Amino acid sequence: MTLEQLRIFVCVAEREHMTDAARTLHVTQSAVSAAIAALEARHGVRLFHRVGRGIVLTEAGSLFLAEARIILARVAAAEAMLDDLSGLKRGTLRVVASQTIAAYWLPPALAAFRARFPHLEIVLEIGNTMQVAAHVQAGQSDFGIVEGKVDNPVLAQWPIAQDRLVLVRSTPFDAQSCTAEALQKADWVMREQGSGTRSTLDECLRQSGVDSETLTEVLVLPSNESVRTAVEAGAGIAGLSSLVVAPALAAGTLYAAPLAFGPREFFGLRHKERYRSQAVEALTDFIAQYSAQQG
């Protein structure tokens, strides 16, 4: 069993797709298939069920996935410790962020950080808030940024930036369409459970006298862009980050409700007990400075 086989197995298991894993790892699909086959043959156990064109983890595969992640996390920690000896002249930073942050707020910050530290490689993963927290807890990522508070005692979290949620639809709002009663009866396009945008919107609506648990949800979609596009097509109302809807508001394809929701925080996440490399410390400090400059 090699580290490369473990990396390939974890990537396939997380995506449940050989081709996607090969693309992510920048190897051929045959190399991925061969690595999985070698693991299964050597140990005489099936790691995946082959169902049509898809694959799903067997019970053995699920148990092995947890151990493989632990091993790779320890290897990454050892590599980071050695990289520190080179004084930020090499190393890899594994960052994970929720969708709004990863797509809109974070890229300029990472570009500026990379310009200052050109020898550091940055690997960015994207998930919803719950997935980001799980990544950081498991040691799959060194640093995470989410759109709401995470209730997890093993993770340190601190505020680093803010945005606002905006209620939008494809036609202009009037005073009657913004009342609690009108919003309660409206059709809604929502993000999935576990999304920071979803949890923040639920809280904002409750504070406005709207019962978020009894809304008519015509669509529940897994990305900000799919929600925005559905609303532009007239599917209903949505609550999205001001970062997400700004271009559509400027273009006149969406209209904002005259409601003022308070700012929401973006939070940094790190594991309290895992080793923090110089590169992670440098990124943490840089993000704080960048956020302060953005005001």
Image (cartoon, rainbow, N blue to C red):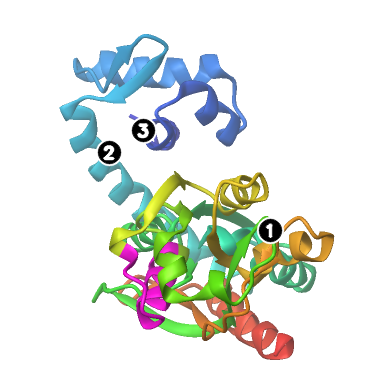
Pointer 2 local density, CA inside 10 Å: few below 14, some 14–19, many at least 20: many
Which mark identifies residue 12? none
Please tell me whether residue 189 is drawn above or below residue 59 in the rendered image: below
Report helix, strand or loop for mark 1.
Answer: loop
Q: Which residue is mark 3?
A: 13
Please tell me whether residue 182 is drawn above or below residue 282 in the rendered image: above
- Are discs 1 and 2 less than 8 Å apart at CB? no
List x then y, in percent, for residue 25.
56, 34
Q: Specify which label sits upstream in the sequence, 1 or 2.
A: 2
Q: Which residue is mark 2?
A: 65
Rendered residue at 63%/72% (across/down): 174
**Depth order, front residue of 73/15:** 15
Q: Which residues are magenta?
A: 198-212
**Depth order, front residue of 145/225:** 225
Which residue type does callout 2 highlight? Leu
Q: Is residue 121 magenta?
A: no
Quadrant of the rendering where the N terminus is positioned? top left
Please tell me whether residue 96 is drawn above or below residue 50 in the rendered image: below
List x then y, in percent, for residue 172.
69, 65
Rendered residue at 77%/72% (across/down): 112
Count of labels shown?
3
Q: Specify which label sits upstream in the sequence, 3 or 2.
A: 3
Which residue type does callout 1 highlight? Thr
Q: Is residue 217 visible?
A: yes
Which mark identifies residue 171? 1
